[in-house]
Image (cartoon, rainbow, N blue to C red):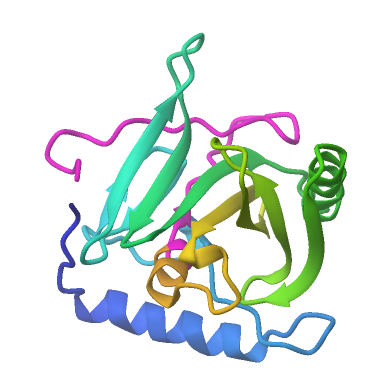
Amino acid sequence: MLGRRKKDASAAEADQSAESVAAEQSDEMGSVTFRGPRDISDVEPSDDRIDLGALQVTGVSGLSLQVSVDEKTQQVSMVTMVLEDAAVQVQVFAAPRSDGIWDDVRGQIMTSITGSGGLVEEIQGAFGTELRARVAGQSGAMQPARFVGIDGPRWFVRGLFLGSAAGESGHADLEEAFATLVVVRGDEAMAPGEPLPMQVPAADEAP
């Protein structure tokens, strides 16, 4: 499990500044967008975050992390953040310098869901344009799912909220944990859509 550590004054001030900026940013529908995830260049250094390579996660009381490793490459392909009866699966990819890819990815997800017999609609949520869907679970029964996409500077984060976080009321604490993710893109040239390298956390950081 991850514990919440006290933030130093500079980190707290940075968070307040980020919140102020986000409050001034609105999407095309006029609703206020969430304040993250954020790029490493936009935050102060902090010991409060767990290093997963391309992603850094801030500890929240009760939050646990699960990493999925690709059998062929032995690289971490996805991180799942679990809190109470909710979870969010997180992946991070390279993206073009100038244009975001969420519009295209969103269309691909919608096509995939409807093609497999699921239901999906676009909504305006805490992270801008989201997809709310009902998809077949492992048991075959339909279950709610919520897809969000965040376009950053040369990176793209995809989140799949499950459990209570996929419902209309969402899960505020898990959304907060997702919003405070920090992306470390690096300078390496990568093709758009290529997964950014993640890693298992060090032993002294592992939940």
* 62 vs 206: above or below: below
Q: Main secondary structure of the magenta part?
A: loop
Would you say 121 lies left or right of 80 here? right
| Residue 134 horizontal/vertical position (percent) | 69, 55
Q: Name the residue rendered at 58%, 77% in the picture.
A: 34
Membership of 169 in magenta stretch = no
Q: Name the residue rendered at 44%, 46% in the picture.
A: 55
Q: Name the residue rendered at 79%, 55% in the picture.
A: 119
Q: Is residue 98 visible?
A: no
Q: Quadrant of the C terminus?
A: top left
Residues 15 and 120: in front is 120
Residues 119 and 201: in front is 119
| Residue 194 horizontal/vertical position (percent) | 67, 30
Would you say 198 lies left or right of 157 here? left
| Residue 92 horizontal/vertical position (percent) | 57, 43
Give the magenta part as a residue range.
Answer: 178-207
Residue 149 lies in what quarter of the image? bottom right
| Residue 89 horizontal/vertical position (percent) | 50, 47
Q: Is residue 107 visible?
A: yes
Would you say 34 lies left or right of 15 here? right
Q: Name the residue rendered at 45%, 72% in the picture.
A: 171
